[in-house]
Image (cartoon, coloured by chain):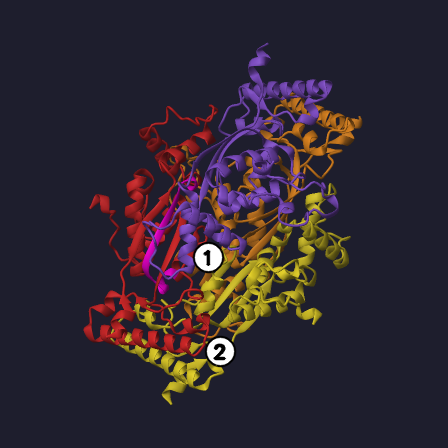
Chain colours: A purple, B orange, C red, D yellow
Amino acid sequence: MGDDRQLKRVRLGVELSSHTPQPEMVVAGAARTCYSAKELALSADELTPQLASKIITRVVQRGHLSVLEHASFTFAVEGLSRAASHQLVRHRIASFSQQSQRYVEFTALEYVLPPTIEERTELAEDFARFIGSAQKLYRRLREAGVPREDARFVLPNASATKLIFTMNARELLHVFTLRLCSRAQWEIRELAHRMLELCYQVAPTIFSLAGPGCRRGPCPEGDMSCGKPWVPFWEE
Amino acid sequence: MGDDRQLKRVRLGVELSSHTPQPEMVVAGAARTCYSAKELALSADELTPQLASKIITRVVQRGHLSVLEHASFTFAVEGLSRAASHQLVRHRIASFSQQSQRYVEFTALEYVLPPTIEERTELAEDFARFIGSAQKLYRRLREAGVPREDARFVLPNASATKLIFTMNARELLHVFTLRLCSRAQWEIRELAHRMLELCYQVAPTIFSLAGPGCRRGPCPEGDMSCGKPWVPFWEE
Amino acid sequence: MGDDRQLKRVRLGVELSSHTPQPEMVVAGAARTCYSAKELALSADELTPQLASKIITRVVQRGHLSVLEHASFTFAVEGLSRAASHQLVRHRIASFSQQSQRYVEFTALEYVLPPTIEERTELAEDFARFIGSAQKLYRRLREAGVPREDARFVLPNASATKLIFTMNARELLHVFTLRLCSRAQWEIRELAHRMLELCYQVAPTIFSLAGPGCRRGPCPEGDMSCGKPWVPFWEE
Amino acid sequence: MGDDRQLKRVRLGVELSSHTPQPEMVVAGAARTCYSAKELALSADELTPQLASKIITRVVQRGHLSVLEHASFTFAVEGLSRAASHQLVRHRIASFSQQSQRYVEFTALEYVLPPTIEERTELAEDFARFIGSAQKLYRRLREAGVPREDARFVLPNASATKLIFTMNARELLHVFTLRLCSRAQWEIRELAHRMLELCYQVAPTIFSLAGPGCRRGPCPEGDMSCGKPWVPFWEE
């Protein structure tokens, strides 16, 4: 009853809330600066999207990835577990603004339910009951005067968080290499997949290069390989 | 009973497990390179500890902090809550190796107990009981075949973690500025204090500069100031 | 004669070629995420520019600068000496694409003339003659089959370069702190000033905070202070 | 005559002036933290060099390179051209202290002579004469009251510089991948080679992994490949 109001199972939400306008034109313009003696084509009349695409493919094939750093992408994410966010924030070439458990009061605990638990009803019920007891204890501690930063000690990894983060295209390709692999945690893999869908729409040449190591050569996981090379959604 | 074996309240442990040998000589030698036309004093006969100390004080006062980056410090920490480690790993100019909840089985849950809960017996008992229920559910999920990466969703922020991390002296001064402030979370403040004690022993000139903003000017927290300027332990 | 075609004194050109659209809305949105329990206002109907401005001022005053990292700015610069670019690329939280002296042939040497030399005719003439001799030797080496990467050894620091670089607003404020100071090299100071003019137009709240240390307190240069506190152009 | 005193052709000097003591023990200890539930082996009785070597090989093969960041190496370099140092300082995950041309007076110009010029006597003579004219003009400008930061505009890329820099083992492997390639500039390739020799002595397991891309798979330079896979000196 009251519990229904105070517990809420949530699902991942991902938005590309901002990005460098015309990211591929910016990247290609930067690449031309490195190798050309011509004037910086600031107005860049001759730089068409087709030419930009060609330039990007060429420099990336040569491994000159630094030009990709000029294109930035900002994501707004909600419904992500603290377990997953702890992994995400370990990427250091990125900027994160995460909902604080020290400043925000958790009157209604939102949580993420892993599929391996959801599919077994009795486990899922125990799980929900446990989340409920965490919420109850949190509230009791707060009412007893315990500060938020200490009351949160009872919040589980399943607690959902919200965050806004910015990464450049080079770091995004790196993130996709690690996190689209079938051996990555299911939740961060889903996040990576959703991010890639959004990026691919605005910069298809750059992000057509995305994917785990198996897309570019033999699986780097060796004897722990899943054996099924990753296929991008645009080739499915 | 069995619970006693499987639950364990732990306390913070901090060791300085490695560091650049003679850190102040290295830093002072680097500072001399920038400003002197003399040969690089690689053998550096004339560079005494006293001279090194003088050089460091001078360059730091002028705000030339980059030379401090040549001295690295590696810490081994255990008994830190996941709540605190989540804050710590947000420092990006640092290298972290943290015990993984995906790879390590938590047969005996170690947890951190905040003082504000410890001091009220009935709250502490509820807290311990809750930790016990988390441990029990974790084990039950594991026995039902749920993978570790999903079972860990029930582990609370209070769970203790272990980590090894490396920071250079410049970043350490930055960490001390933020984390020694009385408004920082109590646990990361204690960690910072213990780290400073260890650093001060091996590089007293560099780390005599450590402390929150109030040591160098007016409190930057404005109307949220604690009103009590921080005093370093060596001046107490 | 022929020399006129092959030597060219150039002046600094700075363009803001791209930036995060509505940078202050993005930054303020990120700040709200950290401190609010409310849904992420992705569509953000209630976030007006006025409210954004208020939020930014508040978080920056508290020293929470990380939210500024979500706004990126890409500059195209030409007519900058290699002496100045060597300083500029030392900023590590930034992305640079610089015209390569290994890949680009310098058929017409562009150079930067320092005012302290320009103002004394006989020095300026010697300087131009020297640049001419560098160009001549460069061409002679090239004709003798010396590769570009070695022929460039004769190119002087005065040689003009072109580059495109991207920095986020937090790093830009740091750059402005260092490079707007009257003790910075004149050329990088002019570059910083031009960059600030461009940034101020698109994000006036964020960049109204820019300036050397003397804008926020006593001059950090101590006994090397110029004695004249910096005044932003919008207050002149 | 006087010229002999004031011009000096120099050669590359590289020293490993400091490093994390027992770097492979530190790295292996960090790796054990990530994957083991055991107590942090701070005293680490059981960790032998042989075991450390095995652990490092295993984690690196799996691509878990972050543990390598706990080992830092500080180099002192002299006799490097400004052309090469400009490339070197572009590595951003590193700390540099470089001799300043703004603070240091260049009474005797030290310069680097590329082999492709040295081998042709008449070119080498023209080159030396040009360096002499740069030195002469530098001195004339200084005597006329031009500040050092402007007089240096006549100093050529061939001018030798001194610097001290620190990188961790992960970044070093990245530097070696790029700079040991036969397509890298000869001087930075020589520097990388000398650095590797020094690193290999103190951490042979870690640095046995060093080398350009051709050591680990097909040449990434494509149709610009030199066709001769790199062979490490310890296998020659």
Mark 2 neighbour density, 10 Å: few (under 14) some (14–19) many (20 or more): some
Circle 2 or circle 1, nearest the eye: 2
For the question of whether residue C166 can be seen, the reply is: yes
- Residue C78 shown in magenta: yes
Q: Which residue is mark 1?
A: B66
Which residue lies most toward the top here? A1
Amino acid at pointer 2: Thr
| Quarter of the figure with the N terminus of chain C | bottom left
Q: Quadrant of residue C54?
A: top left
For the point 38% across and 24% down, the residue is: C45
Q: Dot 1: what SS?
A: helix
- The residue most toward the front is A50
Front residue (pair B108, C94): C94
Q: Secondary structure at mark 2?
A: helix
Q: Is residue A105 above or below residue C119?
A: above
Picture coordinates of residue A9, whole percent (x, y)? 59, 21
The region drawn magenta spans C69-85
Residue D116 lies left or right of residue D153; in this view the side is right
Residue at which label 2 appears: D116
* Residue D214 place in picture, x, y as percent: 63, 61
Q: As shown in the figure, which amino acid type bears the numbered disc 1? A: Ser
Please state the horizontal and vertical placement of residue C31, each as a whole percent of the image: 43, 33
- Crowding around mark 1 (Cα neighbors within 10 Å: few <14, some 14 to 19, many 20+) is some
